[in-house]
Amino acid sequence: MPNAPQFKYFLSHKKNPVQKNSQMWNALLPMSRHQQPNNAGICVSHGDYFTAVRNFLEQDRSEIITRAVSQHMHREVTCEEIEEIRIFLEKHGEFYHPARIETVLHETAISFVLNVAISDAGKSYIQREYDLLKQFDEDFPFSFLPKVYGQGCVSITGNEFRMFLGEWFQGYNEFHISFDPEDEKHKIVVWDYVNGNYFLTTDQATNLYRQAARILTCYYNVETFEQISSWHHAAGDFVLKCRNDKIGVKLITARQYRPMFENNGINKDPDMELILEALLVFFLNLTVRMRLDRLGGVGEIVWSDDTSVDGILKGFFESLALKTSNVSLPEPLIDCFRNHLLSCSQSDLFGLSQAMVDAYNPQSPEIPVIKKNLKRHVKILFNAIKMAS
């Protein structure tokens, strides 16, 4: 019989191994990053989780993981070559409980992400997200989102686990606005579990916002008004890599991709005016949503430093410069939009921003923070637009 990979289990990193029949193996899995043990009566142990992941990876003679390793190594890899598979339970999110899957062969370790949905909310997203990520990889020339390799479903102790295997962005880490006790200011801290957490400088943070805004604008469709939505800094949806002061940013999820407006014929054969107005709404929404986070990722909702506005503005226009439209325009799209934006007064931008926020879910805990900061935000944004023109 061919040799099968040896499986090992960990919480986050190698310092926290989990053995079968240990106390942790039998302990209940938290259902959110707030470490709540239960959600709608779901009771899943860590052992159930690791067993479900292993069963998924072993399906069809480990076909999915073997194919993923083969693509990564640019050669055909057999299941027998994989000596060890290490499953690291990374965190507990609102929708997924992602694991890092580290495969070891010929003294080479290759990592992948396995998104695991257990809750009803997670299951409602996971198939759609898998399809979207696959579509984006085929339709866009960008590599800001992870590739996907396969999906499946496993049942353990009466619980259904839905999951898909995707690309792991090696060296990238989650980040959040946090309190720096040294100067008593809010700054962005990077959760680097290998080298230790660190705060970004102001320039690095501005660059972070620039790249995040650029990524979202890259995927915005100027004619159908489709955009990646339901992303949140608080959920750790963007990740960052910092080497020698150079910043790299990726987006690890795409839960929804839909038009800003409901159909009703509004986005059929759009003219220049509609394209520019929709782009303005996308832009203003981007500048607001980009500034929201939770303190330390789990605390109160917080608003980013004003310097983030310059980064958001630059990133948006960098992507817009690459876009074209099938609609006849008197000049390049970026110039048309810049002129349209400059024709708006500060009062115009504030009125449109207010109307946009009024359309948000009124139950959202972000609403009070947005309303508290909106007037100042629009003023800073308006001045930044004038300065950049």
Image (spheres, rainbow, N blue to C red):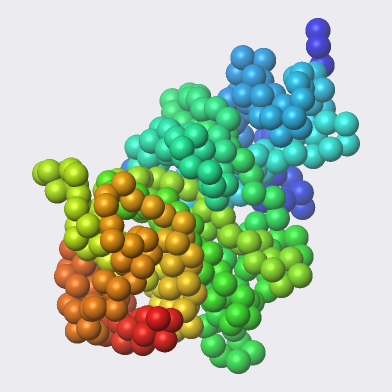
Task: Point out the image quarter for the C terminus.
Answer: bottom left
- Look at 76% across and 70% down and name the residue there: 244
Q: Quadrant location of residue 43?
A: top left
Residue at image x 81%, y 11%? 2
Which residue, as the protein is rendered here, is positioned at the far right? 107
Location of the N terminus by quadrant is: top right
Location of residue 4 by image quarter: top right
**Residue in the image at 42% along x and 61% along y:** 320
Residue 330 appears at what percent x and percent y? 28, 61
Residue furthest left in the image: 264
Q: Nearer the viewer, residue 348 or 70?
A: 348
Depicted 114 relative to depicted 218: above or below: above
Residue 128 is situated, as x and y percent measured from the top left of the image, at: 38, 36
Q: Which residue is painted at 70% across and 61% down in the image?
A: 193
Whether residue 96 is situated above or below residue 250 in the rendered picture: above
Q: In the image, 321: left or right of 48?
A: left
**Above or below, 277 relative to 229:** below
Q: Residue furthest bottom?
A: 183
Give 185 or 284, whichever is nearer the viewer: 284
Image-based side of 318 in relation to 81, left or right? left
Residue 90: give x, y in percent of width and height: 61, 49
Furthest residue in direction top, as rendered: 1
Q: Percent from the top left, x then y, of residue 39? A: 38, 46
Q: Is residue 157 visible?
A: no
Examine the rendering and report whether any part of residue 174 can be seen: yes
To which quarter of the image does residue 300 belong? bottom left
Which of these two is toward me, 268 or 281? 268
Horizontal side, residue 183 vs residue 350: left or right? right
Q: Is residue 257 left or right of residue 147?
A: left
Label total for image = 0
